[in-house]
Amino acid sequence: MRYIEPHGHMVSRTTDDYQAMALAGCAAICEPAFWAGFDRKSADGFYDYFCQLTQIEPKRAAKYGLPHYSWLCINPKESEDMALAADVLALIPEFLKAPTVLGIGEIGLNKNTRNEMKVLEQHIGLAVKYDQMILVHTPHLEDKRKGTRLIMDCLKANGVVKPERVIIDHVEEHTIHEVLDQGFWAGITLYPESKSTPVRAVDMIESVSAQRVWLNSACDWGHSDPLSVPKAAQEMRRRGHSAAAIDRLVYGNPVKFLSQSPRFKDPAAQA
Amino acid sequence: MSTPQPHPGAPARTREQVADLHFMDARYKLLDLAAFLDRLDRAAGGDDHRVRGLRAALPLLLEKDEGRVARILTLWSDPSVAPIEKADTKAASGVWPGLK
């Protein structure tokens, strides 16, 4: 089996996880910028983090034969500080020149505040200005439904963003249909507890036209599983899905979305 | 029990096959939930909003129509539509605190 991990926070993982993912069939990893578990005090911290994402992590992944790509932003959890957000946004254009950067992400909302909305609008503007794809983080738990709707309204209000170049991640049963109905891609994030389990993800896959859906593990510094995408594939096999249908979901779909960036190379075409 | 409504993306399967695959998983999760409620009973104090939300969701499990997960997630969701001025926490609790 082959698969793409389209959203994994590998800076939080050990090299053992790279090894396990490669052994499980992972063919490429994409890493959006995210919250480190604490608020960084200055843009310098983000400068170092963006260097890590664009220079260090691709080298670590390459030791296991894995291409590594990244997305850049200031996470919504740190967007309440508008001055810090402005400083970080000013850094991003320089890093967009790096050959493995695919776009702006994971941007979005956390607690659905006015400042988070303003910084989201600024990120969307940056993506439009530099013709970048967008990877969206939707809020957690009770804030997800409202935040997902606010984010989609914000994207549509921009007037230029093409929905097919935006993936709205962390959808669940109460948001996936709206996201797909509005023309966006939908990401199902697999966590042991807090988002979707592999079993629920397969239920969702069976309930929608899955042509614009990907699965990802996020695999961050919290309770998470870097092998959850192949585990979801295994659940599909148990239920009788064909090998072609599984391959389309865990490999073909992410390749189709990500290939909208000329920087992403289909690993199969490189073999 | 409702009339089967297979999804277009799902291979055909019988309820017995579904039970063969997933019954034990559902069984232990239900027992874990029962144990959690017992544990709460043995503890001091009243229910907080998260536990009230959990109890409010239990009747939805017994509804006949499909879509129980979405209905529970919606029940626990913030129903407001406008951005808030400022948050007093970064974290979400799992159930909207205003749920009655």
Image (tube, rainbow, N blue to C red):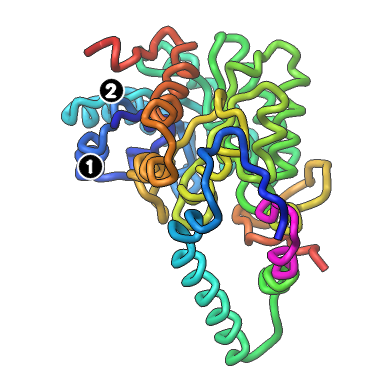
For disc 2, the marked residue is A67
> How many numbered marks are there?
2
Three-letter amino acid code at the position of disc 1: Ala
Sequence-wise, which precedes: disc 2 or disc 1?
A: 1
- Identify the residue shown where x is 69% and y is 45%: A174
In this rendered view, identify the residue nearer to me: A249 or A44: A249
In this rendered view, identify the residue nearer to me: B18 or A48: B18
Left or right: where A92 falls relative to A226 = right
In this rendered view, identify the residue nearer to me: A101 or B41: B41
Q: Is residue B40 visible?
A: yes
Q: Is residue A87 visible?
A: no
Q: Is residue A267 above or below residue A174?
A: above
Q: Chain of mark 2?
A: A
x, y percent for residue A76:
59, 39
x, y percent for residue B27:
50, 71
- Identify the residue shown where x is 59% and y is 25%: A185
If the image is split into quadrants, where does the N terminus of chain B sit?
A: bottom right
Marking on residue B63:
none
For disc 1, the marked residue is A20
Dot 1 falls on a residue whose secondary structure is helix
Local packing at callout 1 (Cα closer than 10 Å; few below 14, some 14-19, many 20+) is some
Three-letter amino acid code at the position of disc 2: Pro
Query: Quarter-wise, where is residue B44 in the image?
Result: bottom right
